Amino acid sequence: MDLYDLTVHELLDKLKNKEITLEEINKSYIERINEKENEVKAFVTITDEDAVEKAKKIDDDIKNGKEVSKLSGIPIGIKDNICTKNVKTTCSSKMLENFVSPYDATVMNKINKENMIMLGKLNMDEFAMGASTEYSYFKKTSNPWDLKRVPGGSSGGSAAAVAAGMVPWALGSDTGGSIRQPSAFCGTVGLKPTYGLVSRFGLVAFASSLDQIGPITKDVTDSAILLNIIAGHDEMDSTSAKVEKKDYTKSLIRDVKGLKIGLPKEYFGEGINPEVKNAVMNVAKEYEKMGAIVEECSISVTDYALATYYIIACAEASSNLGRFDGIRYGYRTENFSNLTDIYKNSRSEGFGKEVKRRIILGTYVLSSGYYDAYYKKALKVRQVVKNEFKKLFEKYDILLTPTSPTVAFEIGTRSNNPLEMYLADICTVSINIGGVPAISIPCGVDSNGMPIGCQLIGNHFEEEKILKAAFTYEQETKFREKYKPTFKK
């Protein structure tokens, strides 16, 4: 097996046994990027110039008996809306095409403290607004399982790079499913932590009350390892939660006996592809065989979740993106004769169609006469969603649903139909509204060989339960041993 096919914990085992070096690991990934990037188009910026030299230096430090961190020299990819000092952070937008951040995001400080090696910034839907990575200003990313299909979004570059073996793991961000849905489409593991568990400082904001940084990995063990690194309270983020530091790898136990699992019936009805539904129902049967208790349940406000999400998300986007005015930083138009022209033309030329659409929708729902009718009402429904989750988790340990109603669709088939694109988030948005954690794991493939993802949802700050359940299923079914991306053209 090639080095780029291994998980991070498998690489660590080989390093420990002195079977490989960090130099060999980084060379393997750089060669893979050179081989596959033209097909997959996962990167906005590649930062591999001195990766091998850095790895070689760490190898020398280890040989000389110097103490290094466990993950020192391990490569990683970073979604391009996470600020990286002295490296471009573009959010895949013309507006920030040449923006170089003067500081690192908190998660990057933690990555750098471990002395990991960033191989590049990964493509995404512009300002994280999309479900296919077709709304990037720079390029359309392809799905490594079928290059004619989308990788999902907005963290499509992150999921595609991991699936293609161009990075062993990556960071993404999730506002309404943007880690989990591309993970389902690309056959990777994607974790959306509880809101506030991971600092958002240095994440370019889309919707501040919904955004959350999380890991995209090859398996559940790597997800727990990376969550250990990035989780924790941050004084720089006012929404960061003060919770006890945990070792999430301790939850990686193969045991679900007595675990109570709820199947919300609303997630298995109209609009869910039959093959996706059957695959997730088979997951439920597998859990029952392993001793879990599975029951049908209901989240009655599911029908309102998508509308609630888009009202809140677009309202916050309208406010957050107001800072991009052509004055302080970012794109500035050359066509102006006064200050109003600078504002108007810079934003008109700098933002793509989808971003403009959401700004307009957000401004509308916040405007006088419509604030009470839409935004205020959406906030009330949000509280109802939180209450429903709270009630369900009094009875169940976790909830099981599809991650997406379909498998990855073909590039170009939905990009001109915003409503159809928004429906790709139907299974994931309520989790962000409720602020609870959820993980997407692969649970099979459809008749065309495309990955299907199932979603495990947990209560606030109970990541251990969903990681344990995900790990147990993964070990039982061995998806990675049975299936691999084909790069079909």
Image: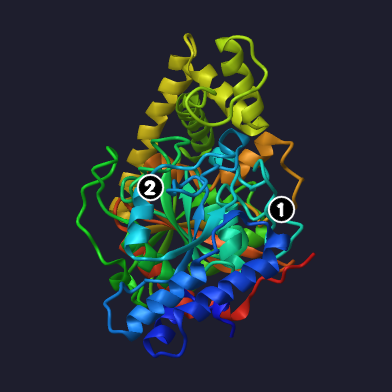
Q: In the structure shown, which secondary structural element does the residue marked by tag 1 occupy?
A: loop
- The 10 Å Cα crowd at callout 1, few under 14, some 14 to 19, many 20 or more, is some
Residue 489 horizontal side relative to residue 463, left or right: right
Q: Residue at x 24, y 63 (%)?
A: 246
Report, in whole angstroms, how far the alpha carbon at label 1 lies from the one at label 2: 33 Å
Seen from the viewer's position, the closer of residues 89 and 443 is 89
> Residue visible at 76% across and 67% down?
488
Where is residue 121 drawn, in percent x and y? 54, 53
The chosen color scheme is rainbow
- Quadrant of the snapshot with the N terminus: bottom right
Q: Neighbour class for label 2 at 10 Å: few (<14), some, many (≥20)?
A: many
Residue situated in front as seen by the camera: 470 or 112: 112
Name which residue lies at 34% across and 54% down: 109
In the current view of this chain or complex, which residue is farthest to the right? 489
Q: Amino acid at mark 2?
A: Ala
The C terminus, quarter of image: bottom right
Question: Sequence order check: which comes first, mark 1 or mark 2?
Answer: 2
Residue 409: mark in rendering? 1
Point out residue 124 in the picture as x, y percentages from the top left corner. 59, 47
Residue 289 in view: no
